[in-house]
Amino acid sequence: MRVVEIVADLHVADVDAAREFYASYLGLTTEEFNLGWVARFSSPDTGANVQVVTRDAAAPEDPVISIKVDDVDWAYQDAQRRGYEIVHPLSSESWGVRRFFVRAPDGNVLNIVQNHE
């Protein structure tokens, strides 16, 4: 498995209110996606981005970061082999990703994710 990208999941009360700050103030004006409970805003010039989350709509806990990988099935099997706590099982989500949540030994919950092929 290879880590492709790491995205911070910032917890916010309201995605629309967060858009005002991140788009108007920081210039992250490209809205890559918005599911109502999670959205990503990016700089059209640099690609720098931030992901905001109110509450994960499909999982029991909220992750602190999303780790994009090139082989989520292998990552899931390796996490199980190592005895890490799986917080949300490996799932294919309707918005085009395959993911699972794992709790790191420090207690942080990570979203391990791969876009559908």
Image (cartoon, rainbow, N blue to C red):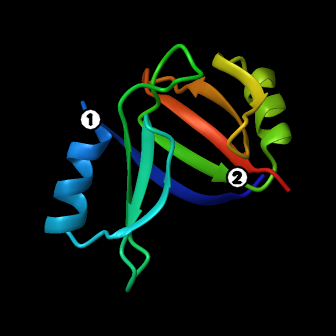
In this view of the protein, which residue sits in the foreground, 11 or 23?
Answer: 23
Binning the other alpha carbons within 10 Å of mark 2 as few (below 14), some (14 to 19) or many (20 upward) gives: many
Q: Position of residue 29 (x, y in %)?
A: 32, 70
Q: Quarter holding the C terminus? A: bottom right
In this view of the protein, which residue sits in the foreground, 85 or 105?
Answer: 85
Residue at image point 53% right, 13% down: 60
Which residue is the site of mark 2?
Answer: 69
Q: Amino acid at mark 2?
A: Val
Quadrant of the image occupied by residue 86: top right
Of tags 1 and 2, the one toward the viewer is: 1
Residue at image point 43% right, 55% down: 40
Residue at image point 43% right, 34% down: 37
Quadrant of the image occupied by residue 12: top left
Q: Position of residue 30 (x, y in %)?
A: 40, 70
Q: Is residue 4 above or below residue 14?
A: below
Is mark 1 in CB contact (under 8 Å) with mark 2? Answer: no
Label number found at residue 14:
1
Binning the other alpha carbons within 10 Å of mark 1 as few (below 14), some (14 to 19) or many (20 upward) gives: some
Residue at image point 52% right, 24% down: 57
In this view of the protein, which residue sits in the foreground, 72 or 98?
Answer: 98
Task: Please tell me which of labels 1 and 2 falls first in the chain.
Answer: 1
Q: How many marks?
A: 2
In this view of the protein, which residue sits in the foreground, 108 or 7?
Answer: 7
